[in-house]
Amino acid sequence: MANLTVVVDDEVLKRARKRAIDLGTSVSAFVAREMERFAQPETTDTPLKDLVELSKRVHGDSGGWKWNRQESYEERLGRWSRNPKGGGSDNGEPDDRGGR
């Protein structure tokens, strides 16, 4: 196995070390893994593999919010309303919130 010397800003390395600890790895292991990926030929399924790998490493936090179909529809209907009081317009032009 070969050694590689990389020059990076001290603050960047400090932040990278903290992040690596949070992810349960080391900066060296992360760089080696990314270099291995970088050296592989690009395939059509690479983005999917990247997404799967990312989903294993990153955990979202909704802050307790639960998905609600009715709220989703209400938001969409309010955005696309043809009712002037609802914020939409009849002419197909976007309103000030980006709706039509």
Image (spheres, grey):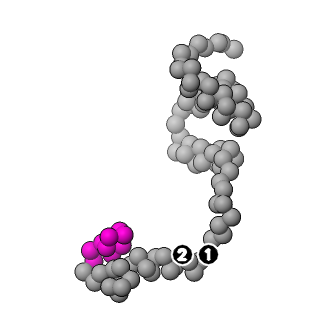
Query: In the picture provided, is 95 more to the left or to the right than 32?
Result: left
Checking the image for residue 6, the label placed there is none
Q: Amino acid at mark 1?
A: Asn
Q: Tell me where residue 93 sits by quadrant.
A: bottom left
Q: Amino acid at mark 2?
A: Ser
- At horizontal 46% and vertical 76% (from top left) the residue drawn is 76
Which residue is more in the foreground, 54 or 19?
19
58 w.r.t. 26: above or below: below
Query: In the picture provided, is 76 more to the left or to the right than 84?
Result: right
Badge 1: few (under 14), some or many (20 or more) residues near its Cα, within 10 Å? few
Considering the whole magenta stretch, tell me its main secondary structure.
Answer: loop
6 w.r.t. 79: above or below: above
Residue 10, image x and y in percent? 57, 20
Which residue is more in the foreground, 29 or 49?
29
Checking the image for residue 72, the label placed there is 2
53 w.r.t. 39: above or below: below
Instruction: Classify the position of the C terminus by image quarter.
Output: bottom left
Q: Tell me where residue 80 sits by quadrant.
A: bottom left
- Give the residues in magenta: 92-100
Instruction: Classify the position of the N terminus by image quarter.
Output: top right
Instruction: Say whether marks 2 and 1 touch (CB < 8 Å).
Output: yes
Disc 2 to disc 1, C-alpha distance = 6 Å
- At horizontal 32% and vertical 70% (from top left) the residue drawn is 96
Q: How many marks?
A: 2
Q: Which residue is mark 1?
A: 68
